[in-house]
Amino acid sequence: MTAVDEVELRQHFEATIAHDQRIEPRDWMPDGYRNTVIRQIAQHAHSEIIGMQPEGNWITRAPSLRRKAILIAKVQDEAGHGLYLYSAAETLGADRADLTDKLITSRQKYSSIFNYPTMSYADVGVIGWLVDGAAICNQVPLCRSSYGPYARAMIRICKEESFHQRQGYELLMTMMRGTTEQQAMVQDATDRFWWPSLMMFGPPDDASPNTARSMGWGIKRHTNDELRQRFVDMTVPQAQKLGVTLPDAQLRWNGERGHYDFGPIDWQEFFAVVKGDGPCNSQRIEHRRRAHEDGAWVREAAIAHARKAVAR
Ligand SMILES: [Fe+2]
Ligand SMILES: [Fe+2]
């Protein structure tokens, strides 16, 4: 390719972004864009897959057949989300085996939230309400992401996330109508998951060096702090309706800003969890590594079968 070709291709890429149109797999794109989108999609895919563990842990102990069926459906959805997203990363030339290898050797990250343990069935409800709720805030704007396959995958994923959020809230509503012990379980789970849910939006804007570039490319549509504020504003009235207290003494409505003010986030905790020092990091990775190794024979059999089919 000559230098002139490259200038033209770059202009075409930039015009596509400027017109808010989608970049498709066969289009020319700068390496920085390709690598940033691969990294974001991979991190998102890993989060869906690792995110099956904290709740999957409760499937065998669901309190009723109805709750078990709902939880299985939800955890299966997360597996599906992981698969669409790995496929979206493959359209950019990433290799899925390589992405899995990067996950299980801790060279790529997943959401910090999944490194916290699930202590009771109320956690299933609170994860649906807060964690899937935060995921929706993050992901709805990604339905307009500049990379076409990612944006299209997000449309379906967001529909399913909305079911996840509702099943969680409905479970909590049921528990809050129950015994005082059940109400205490909901409050305890809320106390444990509130701050880690706010951390899901990532570091504050002044400590998030890649945000401006990702927004310029239309990969991201809002800053971390904007999305976090949106989540708090959406969640406070839901907590009131539920009858739980959010564990933040500084949380109050600010009429001037038209938003809720909230207390400082413990960023030291966040960075420790991201670095690998959360309560469950090694357990999550170890479990994923073992599952991958246990599945080796399935991959080998599938390849052998495909070869035979070609030979026939
Ligand atoms: Fe998901
Ligand atoms: Fe979900």
Image (spheres, grey):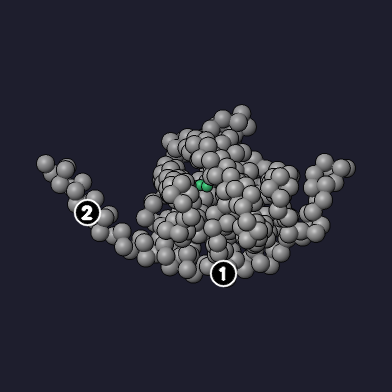
Q: Position of residue 224 (x, y in %)?
A: 68, 49
Relative side of 198 to 105, left or right: right
- Tag count in the figure? 2
Given the image, on which type of amino acid does mark 2 rest?
Ala
Q: Residue furthest right?
A: 256
Q: Position of residue 253 (x, y in %)?
A: 83, 47
Mark 2 neighbour class, 10 Å CA radius: few under 14, some 14 to 19, many 20 or more: few
- Residue closest to the far front: 179
Viewer-proximal residue, 11 or 126?
A: 126
Mark 1 = which residue?
A: 279
Question: Can residue 31 be seen in the rendering of this structure?
Answer: no
Residue at 41% x, 62% y: name it.
288
Across and down, in percent, residue 61 comes to: 45, 59
192 or 231: nearer the viewer: 192
Q: Nearer the viewer, residue 112 or 119?
A: 119
- Judge depth for marks 2 and 1 and give the one in front: 1
Q: Are marks 2 and 1 in contact (CB under 8 Å)?
A: no
Determine whether the residue tagged by mark 1 lies in a helix, strand or loop. Answer: loop
Q: Which residue is mark 2?
A: 301
Q: CA distance from mark 2 to mark 1?
A: 36 Å
Q: Quadrant of the N terminus?
A: top left
